[in-house]
Amino acid sequence: MSEDLFILRPKKTLKTAQMQIVPNAFARHPVTSPSVCGLAFDWEADHIARYLRAEDKRELEAIGLVEPLAAIKDCLRRSGVGSMVYRLPARVMPWEPVAMFGCAPVEGMPHLGRPWLIGTQRMGERGIHVLRFAERFLSAIQRHYPVLENYVYAENTGAIRFIKRLGFTVDSAEPWGPLEKPFCRFWRKRPVVENN
């Protein structure tokens, strides 16, 4: 029985080498507060776009994406079944999505994955829990992608702190994207295990 929160399986229906991330039914949440992490659905993208954090909205605008829902759905589509969502109990619905994350493959570069995370204002309430889920998610996905790399808006200091806590190296800001706004490349390599 696996101790991991997520397990990776090859998705056989795809011609390209892509992995399916599946929540491990036997895994236990490391904290006592009620929450659940599972595969992401389209309706959850609608909810996250509606209640998107201001800093995430500014980052999307800095890339030239003014429609958050289209951007989130594009991330979901690119990541396929490699997208996860962190949910909290809510008053209106059984579970309210507060953060969505995934990792998209890079065409022609099977060793490289593009991790992403986007959230609602409620993400700040459970930042440490989202961080723990993200750590486990990245450990699982990095079995398939030895290198993870993406860009973060240089003015999104909260996201940069979060990324660093996940063990990423964050480079200096440089003009990036169609609007040439300041973005920082962040990356992390799978640790090399030495056999003694």
Image (tube, rainbow, N blue to C red):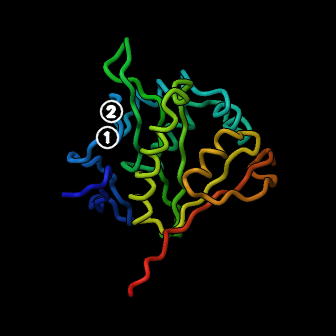
Identity, as a three-letter code, of the amino acid under mark 1 = His
Question: Which percent across, then down, holds residue 29?
Answer: 31, 40
Identity, as a three-letter code, of the amino acid under mark 2 = Thr
Q: Quadrant of residue 91?
A: top left
Looking at the image, is 105 positioned above or below residue 155?
below
Q: Secondary structure at mark 1?
A: loop
Question: Which percent across, then down, holds residue 152?
Answer: 67, 47
Q: Which residue is mark 2?
A: 32
- The quadrant of the image that shows the N terminus is bottom left
Question: Which percent across, then down, holds residue 26?
Answer: 20, 47
Q: Is residue 141 left or right of residue 169?
A: left
Give the residue drawn at x 64%, y 42%: 159
Q: Secondary structure at mark 2?
A: loop
Q: Which residue is mark 1?
A: 29
Q: Residue furthest bottom?
A: 196
Give the residue drawn at x 58%, y 50%: 165
